[in-house]
Amino acid sequence: MDINTLFLFLLVIASYLNLYLSFNKKKKDTKLPISSKEWREKVEDERFKSWVSNRKRLKDKRKGDINH
């Protein structure tokens, strides 16, 4: 085995190790714009508002049916 082949092999290993470590660092540093708790609260709030709106619309519709 030639010395240049050994150095090439070590260089390839070092480059893959560097790529792996930099990928893991970016993965850990990534922050989501909104937390899962905030997202769940937002979805529940939207569902509640939709429910209230639909309930009000149905009440108005029932009042219209009774009057006619």
Image (cartoon, helix red, strand yellow):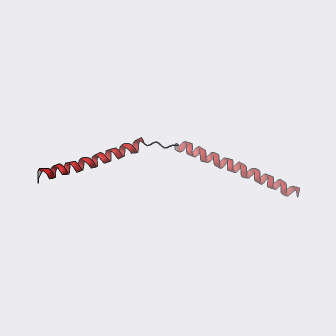
Q: Residue 40 in the image: x percent, y percent?
A: 57, 46
Rendered residue at 76%/50% (across/down): 56
Q: Quadrant of the C terminus?
A: bottom right
Q: How many marks?
A: 0
Rendered residue at 31%/47% (across/down): 19
For residue 14, side relative to residue 30 (left or right): left
For residue 44, side relative to residue 36 (left or right): right
Q: Residue 18 in the image: x percent, y percent?
A: 29, 45
For residue 45, side relative to residue 33 (left or right): right
Q: Quadrant of the N terminus?
A: bottom left
Of 8 and 43, nearer the camera is 8
Q: Residue furthest right?
A: 68
Rendered residue at 21%/48% (across/down): 11
Q: Residue 67 in the image: x percent, y percent?
A: 88, 55
Q: Residue 8 in the image: x percent, y percent?
A: 19, 51
For residue 67, side relative to residue 35 (left or right): right
Rendered residue at 56%/45% (across/down): 39
